[in-house]
Image (cartoon, rainbow, N blue to C red):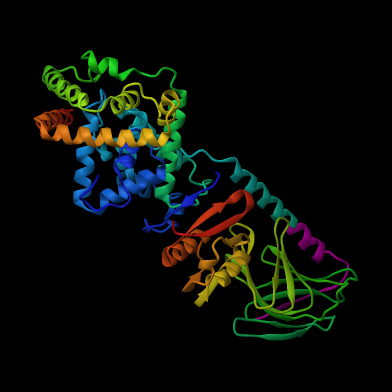
Amino acid sequence: MAQKAENMNVTDELLSRYFSGEASPEEAMTIDDWRDRNEANNKEFNALRTAWNATSTHPYVIQDARAVWQQMQPLPQRSRPRRIRIATWTAAAAVLTGIVISLAILLRPVRQYTVTTAANETRQLKLPDSSHLTLLASSTLTYPETFATAERHIALQGRAGFDIHSIPEQPFIITVGGLQIKVLGTAFNVAEEDTATIVKVLTGKVLMYTSSDTLPVAGGQTAIYSKHDQHIRYDRVFHFENEELSVVCKALSAAYQTNIIIDHPAIASLKISSNFDNKSLDYILEVITTTLNIQYTRKPEKNEIHFTEEN
Amino acid sequence: MCIVYLRVKHFYGTLEPLNDLKTDSALLEQYFLEYFEVLHSYAYTILKDNDEAKDAVQAVFIQLWQKRESLQIRQSVRAYLYTATHNHCLNHIKSRKIRRKHYDRFASGMSSTSTTDIEQQIVFTDMKKEVLEAMKALPDRCREIFFKSRFEEKSYSEIAAELQISVKTVEAQMGKALRTLRTILSERTFSWLIISAQLISVLKNLFH
């Protein structure tokens, strides 16, 4: 049979499939990996290709990649996709909404207080509804003399800690760094940075929202609003310490808002230890599958990811 | 995109660098130089034409460049490139109106369209004799399947349907044909001819 050289499931059948143009992208990659393994495999491949070529009127000829690259210069201008434009309009709409809301807050007949802290100053504040607030350094808080009956609105620039007096029928709403946070009676911290607004909820639950995005954040969770892409998402920092795959899947499912399913019960109890600091889901999946020697399959139409045993 | 199947054996860089394409054509060049040869080889197997294969790979990279801001690549860059090349080739084949009958030309001495110089013609003529001889050594069934695949450019499934056999059988016979050809051709003077043919094309490239 095929190879004295190391065999990575590369058979004569697979090789002839490849030469016949029947190989799938995965099979082509398998063959290329196999060639890369060692020189013997590569030589065998070249010998087979030569034999195959001999029966062709248009034999394969290796081309100089650099020359082909030169032919492609200059690269064409990028075609700006429609998606970007929609995003721009959404951004414009969000900014406009933000301005309108801010104006609505600021132009209300109710008298507004503005408190600003210096670079080395922290100030404790008590709001009209007897909620407590710690305004950290270099921050500004705007709040009304009395809250409207329907909703309690305040605006923040910078960082603050909140302990909100719970009044279920009169939600507490903070406008900060491009988004709103609706508080449902809780303690939490807010920090507005240059690129993002970070909300860390200690107890209870808050709702972070913009005109286009909504995310509930519960006690123990941290969420980030990115000013760049205007999305709110959970902070994706994970420290898995000898954790079972089933637990890891739950945490990832929640953070990336997808369903991660373990198809084979046998792999559910595999253990993993790893730290992921705001990595892409693809990255994390690759690390997990490589570490545990399992596979994953995406089913985007169902928003599912399946872990399966290595075939 | 439907189901993307990933079997991760190695890391080919991280997944993030693709984002850098937005600012960096040097990265595109790096990917191109790294993957052109294997992608071209793969595209050639499907299209059976060097230039068309080259065009296909170029198109894949130009598409990657033009769409880099909106593309969402859920696989590794490598897997993306192979898949895109595959799709591109299949689309291209669909758009090909007439299938060329390679064997007619092969047997009638009209070898490659570009081989106009006499030296190369001679090499090809000798080579052809060897190859036709070698193919006689294949069992009848095997040769029939091989001919349909190589010279009529039929797909495995077309051959299977035509001969009322399974695709698996076609695969097995094609594997056998490949192995037989390899064995016979390497035993004969053939390797010499191949080397001289390759030398000529290398020399031609050098002086162009």
Residue that appears at 26% across and 48% down: A35
Which quadrant is home to the N terminus of chain B? top right
Image coordinates of residue B73 in percent, x first then y, are: 49, 49
The image quarter containing residue A43 is top left
The verdict on residue A130 being magenta is: no
B78, above or below A176, in the image = above
| Residue farthest toward the top in the current orientation of the protein | B108
Q: Is residue B41 visible?
A: yes
Which quadrant is home to the C terminus of chain B? top left
Which stretch did the figure color magenta? A98-117
Image coordinates of residue A201 in percent, x first then y, are: 68, 77
Image coordinates of residue A202 in percent, x first then y, are: 68, 80
B62 vs A280, left or right, is: left
The image quarter containing residue A96 is bottom right
A221 vs A167, left or right, is: left
| Residue farthest toward the right in the current orientation of the protein | A149
